[in-house]
Image (cartoon, rainbow, N blue to C red):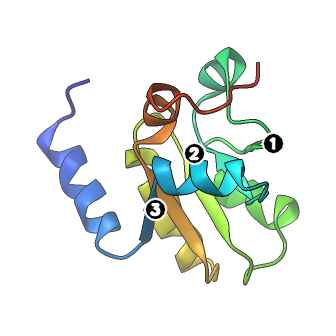
Amino acid sequence: MSHSPEFLKIVDDAKSRVKQTDVPAVLARVKRGEKPVLVDVREDNEWAKGRIPGAMHIGKGVIERDVEDAIPDKNGEVILYCGGGFRSALSADNLQKMGYKNVISMDGGWRGWVEAGGPVEK
C-alpha cells in the first residue's frame, strides 16, 4: 500500500515517541503461553476478516473515547496492532498523551503476523 508523504511524516513523528515491538517478539510470547493485552485498532471490516486470538478490538477512530473503560490500568502493558504498524503507532502516541505508561506499537501489524504464521481467529 502506498501512503502519502504527509501521513508518513506524522507516523514517523509518532514512532519517535512510542515504544515498538515486532511480530516475532509478540509471536514468541504467545507461543510461550503468555497472554499480553493485545488491542487491534483496525477498522471493523478488517477485524471481522480475522484477528490475533484473544485480542480486543478498539478501532483507531474511537480508541481515545473507549480505552479507559476497556483498559483502566494505565500502568499495564498494552500492545497495539493494525494492518502494518502505522495506525497503531498513531494510537499509541495518543494513549501515552492520555497517561498510559506502557503502550507499545507492533511493527509489521496484522500482515506481518499472518506472514509469520501466527495463529488467527475469525
- Tell me residue 92's x, y (percent): 52, 64
The residue that mark 3 highlights is 21
Type of amino acid under label 3? Thr
- Tell me residue 82's x, y (percent): 51, 40
The residue that mark 2 highlights is 60
Q: How many C-alpha atoms fall within 10 Å of the one at disc 1: few (<14), some, or many (≥20)?
A: few
Residue 97 at least partly seen: yes
Q: Earlier in the sequence, mark 3 or mark 1?
A: 3
Asked if residue 5 is positioned above or below residue 80 in the image, the reply reads above
Q: Nearer the viewer, residue 121 or 83?
A: 121
Q: How many C-alpha atoms fall within 10 Å of the one at disc 2: few (<14), some, or many (≥20)?
A: many
Residue sitting at 75 percent across and 59 percent down? 37
Q: How many C-alpha atoms fall within 10 Å of the one at disc 3: few (<14), some, or many (≥20)?
A: some
C-alpha span from label 1 to label 2: 18 Å
Write down the quadrant of residue 34 in the picture. Answer: bottom right
Q: Which secondary structure, mark 2?
A: loop
